[in-house]
């Protein structure tokens, strides 16, 4: 039956080719991981390709990813990269069955893509970044070449029939080669992970050993009544583990506090300086409750948190360096903060130096910053969205102008300047809840950082706006809880909220998208009272 046997041989060929391709790709990744672990943990293959993809993703798509996958967006991206890689590997493996050299060359080509991605990353330091991809690709190409050579000796392909003789050896030859490759690749990958982990341990130890000094200026006592008792309302202080996280880092930078440095330089800096962490900690520290918000937060969204931060007043450091704000004749209007992973964020020098509590934070809710939130030092400027102020893993501050330099997100069409827009959110009842009729507590938070919230109003359906009860105001830089006792009647109802900020301006009804400078509009939820 020639038809059956040729189908069988096609199937065997496909399976062998796919296996060879996948093993080659796996080996390439494992070897790259090993070399990255030895020379540069931040240049792991999936990390650099993922990073390059993130850099090139148009802002609306990135925004969509954050919205759809939330804080899982990076896991989804990594899975996506691995899936694409697997498909290409299968294709190259099949190609390798008939054209061994072409298959191997394809793997090498992929290595070049990885190397190019590594070089294009903003934190690239040159040749050390391409080594992992190049070494991985060489190993992968070699594996594909050798496995394809073994595979064609497998009986169903070599035409030796099902007899045991040569055919059995051919099959065993492929399986042995594949097994040895798999074990070697797994070992290389594990060793790479081990080296990467060991380098992170220095950073972990430096964080565990860090004792935060007492603040010279403790946070003002939080007035009684800042926290309302409404069930379901967002806590006034967000715990570190609940605090939202938004950044482009595929692997969280693990910075060793002992070797960390912050350089301050640029336009109008008459006394440029590089600070160590100990030098910063020896200065008088301030402690403040500050609410941080992401510009990608939709109306009613979760990307906001309020923590008690401990840090060095940034304006003082800048004054010492000779910097003047534009209003006092300074020549730089933009402060560009740069992180260890090459992210750049630009803030108005005027805002940083106008007396607000702009700081280089070292503590968050009584602990050293968690790695995810910027250990050892991050910047905060109350009143500005995170992407124009809150640089995590900061290592460099350059004074420049808005004219001269566009930071990362501005290059991607987000606004140069982005003060936080006045917003309010209904935390309870939840959308489509079915509360019983009678008294229903509507409650939530409102924020207008650095202007403060002075009024919150609730409207049910098309009824009149009614004043909500406000919690005490901790300060103009924090959000404010509110609640409203609603006499709920059976049926479907739309509940809408709006806030007024400290300048007397009512939150606008006009709906805008998050890009370019933050979402606006009123939050409303629909509930069915039973
Ligand atoms: N190094 C670095 N800092 C960064 C970012 C980043 O991607 N990289 N993202 C910024 C954005 S967009 C926001 S909203 C805040 C979020 O801070 P959090 O993750 O601690 O909540 O960090 C800012 N600082
Ligand atoms: Mo953000």
Image: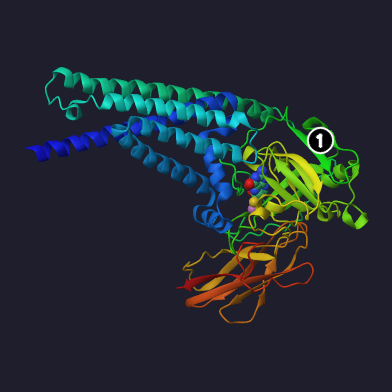
* Quadrant occupied by the N terminus: top left
Residue at (56, 41) in percent of width and height: 250
Q: Position of residue 455 (x, y in %)?
A: 72, 70
Q: Can see residue 287?
A: no
Write down the quadrant of residue 439 in the picture: bottom right
Residue at (82, 34) in percent of width and height: 274
Q: Which residue is mark 1?
A: 280
Residue at (32, 36) in percent of width and height: 95
Front-lying residue, 308 or 326: 326
Front-lying residue, 35 or 422: 35
408 lies above or below 101: below
Q: Position of residue 181 (x, y in %)?
A: 37, 23
In the rendered picture of this protein, how many numbered marks are placed on residues? Answer: 1
Q: Position of residue 452 (x, y in %)?
A: 76, 62
Write down the quadrant of residue 165 in the picture: top left
140 lies above or below 422: above
Front-lying residue, 235 or 73: 73
């Amino acid at each position: 039956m020639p038809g059956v046997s040729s189908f069988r041989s096609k199937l065997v060929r496909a399976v062998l080719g796919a296996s060879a391709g996948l093993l080659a790709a796996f080996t390439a990744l494992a070897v790259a991981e090993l070399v990255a672990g030895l020379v540069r943990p931040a240049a792991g293959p999936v990390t650099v390709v993922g990073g390059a993809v993130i850099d090139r993703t148009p802002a609306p798509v990135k925004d969509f990813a954050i919205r759809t996958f939330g804080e899982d967006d990076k896991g989804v991206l990594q899975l996506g990269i691995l899936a694409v890689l697997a498909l290409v590997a299968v294709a190259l493996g099949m190609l390798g069955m008939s054209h061994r050299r072409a298959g191997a060359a394809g793997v090498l080509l992929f290595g070049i893509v990885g190397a190019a991605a590594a070089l294009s990353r903003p934190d690239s330091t040159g040749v050390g970044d391409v080594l992992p991809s190049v070494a991985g690709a060489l190993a992968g190409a070699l594996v594909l070449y050798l496995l394809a050579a073994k595979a064609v000796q497998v009986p169903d392909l070599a035409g030796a029939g099902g007899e045991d003789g040569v055919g059995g050896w051919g099959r065993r030859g492929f399986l042995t080669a594949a097994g040895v490759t798999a074990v070697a690749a797994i070992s290389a990958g594990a060793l790479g992970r081990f080296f990467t982990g060991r380098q992170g341990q220095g950073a972990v130890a430096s964080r565990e050993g860090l004792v935060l000094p007492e603040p010279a200026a403790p946070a003002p006592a939080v007035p009684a009544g800042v926290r309302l008792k409404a069930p379901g309302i967002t806590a006034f202080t967000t715990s570190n583990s609940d605090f939202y996280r938004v950044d482009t880092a595929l692997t969280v930078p693990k910075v060793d506090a002992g070797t960390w440095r912050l350089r301050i330089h640029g336009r109008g800096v008459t006394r440029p300086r590089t600070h160590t962490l100990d030098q910063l900690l020896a200065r008088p520290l301030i402690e403040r409750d500050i609410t941080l918000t992401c510009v990608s937060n939709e109306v009613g969204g979760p990307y906001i948190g309020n923590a008690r931060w401990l840090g060095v007043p940034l304006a003082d450091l800048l004054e010492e360096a000779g910097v003047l704000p534009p209003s006092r004749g300074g020549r730089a209007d933009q402060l560009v903060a740069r992180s260890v992973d090459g992210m750049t964020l630009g803030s108005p020098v005027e805002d940083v130096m106008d007396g607000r509590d702009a700081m280089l934070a070292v503590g968050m809710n009584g602990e050293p910053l968690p790695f995810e939130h910027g250990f050892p030092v991050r910047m905060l400027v109350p009143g500005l969205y995170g992407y124009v102020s809150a640089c995590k893993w900061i290592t460099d501050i350059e004074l420049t102008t808005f004219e001269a330099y566009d930071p990362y997100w501005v290059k991607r069409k987000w606004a140069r300047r982005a003060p936080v827009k006045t917003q309010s959110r209904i935390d309870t009842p939840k959308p489509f809840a079915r509360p019983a009729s009678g008294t229903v507590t509507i409650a939530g938070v409102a924020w207008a950082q650095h202007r403060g919230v002075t009024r919150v109003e609730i409207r049910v359906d098309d009824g009149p706006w009614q004043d909500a009860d406000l919690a005490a105001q901790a300060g103009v830089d924090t959000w404010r809880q509110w609640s409203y006792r609603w006499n709920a009647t059976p049926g479907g109802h739309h509940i809408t909220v709006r806030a007024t900020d400290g300048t007397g301006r009512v939150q606008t009804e006009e709906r805008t998208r998050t890009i370019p400078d933050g979402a606006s509009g009123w939050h409303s939820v629909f509930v069915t009272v039973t």
